[in-house]
Image (cartoon, rainbow, N blue to C red):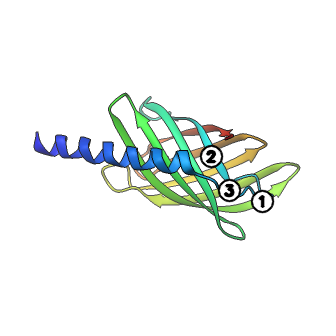
Amino acid sequence: MLAAVLALATSSCGTLAYDRAWQHFDAVADASGLVGRWKGEWESEWNGHSGGLRCMLTREDEDVYLARFHSTYGWLLSYRHEILFHVVGQDEGVLRFEGSEDLGELIGGVYRYRGSVVGDRFEARFEAENGDHGTFRMRRVER
């Protein structure tokens, strides 16, 4: 019981910190189209789970971007994680990226992502070591 209460408290504190960062996020857009705030949903095709998804994307290097995600599941659970996305191609208005991140054994291990941005639409496929797979779909959020 104590572990559940601590997990909920930690999740709530993390959500509040993310919410503050989200409200004050003011990154300068770049020509790639990746930088900015994004909002949408994630969906697992493996287990049917889904939820809300927000992301703040900033440029780290010429072709490297830091994605800070906040995902929800139901009304009680949330998870924050960061992924470095690497641009792997850009043509005809489509920017393609990929990345991977170890989210821990409890969450599914290493997740690999491949996606694209076209205008104000962000879509990525994910696959985890434990077999989980699905999509992230988001739209750019303007101020």
What element does badge 1 sit on?
A: strand
Residue contact between numbered discs 1 and 2, judged by CB atoms under 8 Å: no
Quarter of the image where one finds residue 54: top right
Vertical relation: 14 (above or below) 134: below
> Residue visible at 66% across and 39% down?
141
Residue depth check, mark 1 versus mark 2: number of the one nearer the observer = 2
Instruction: Indicate the quadrant containing the C terminus: top left, top right, bottom left or bottom right.
Output: top right
Say what amino acid the circle numbered 1 marks. Gly
Q: Residues within 10 Å of mark 3 (few under 14, many from 20)?
A: many
Residue placed furthest toward the bottom: 61
Q: Which residue is mark 1?
A: 89
Task: Determine the image quadrant of residue 119.
Answer: top right
State the residue position of label 3: 97
User: Disc 2 residue type?
Assistant: Arg
Residue 18 lies, in percent from the top left, at 45, 48
- Disc 3 residue type? Phe
Closer to the camera, 1 or 50?
1
Give the residue number, with chain letter if any, for mark 2.
37
Tell me the distance, in whole angstroms, between the alpha carbons under discs 1 and 3.
7 Å
Residue 126 in view:
no
Q: Secondary structure at mark 3?
A: strand
> Residue at the spot x=77%, y=59% of the render?
89
SS at mark 2? strand
Compare marks 1 and 3 and give the one earlier in the sequence. Answer: 1
Label 1 packing within 10 angstroms: few (<14), some (14-19), many (20+): few
Q: Position of residue 94 (x, y in %)?
A: 80, 49
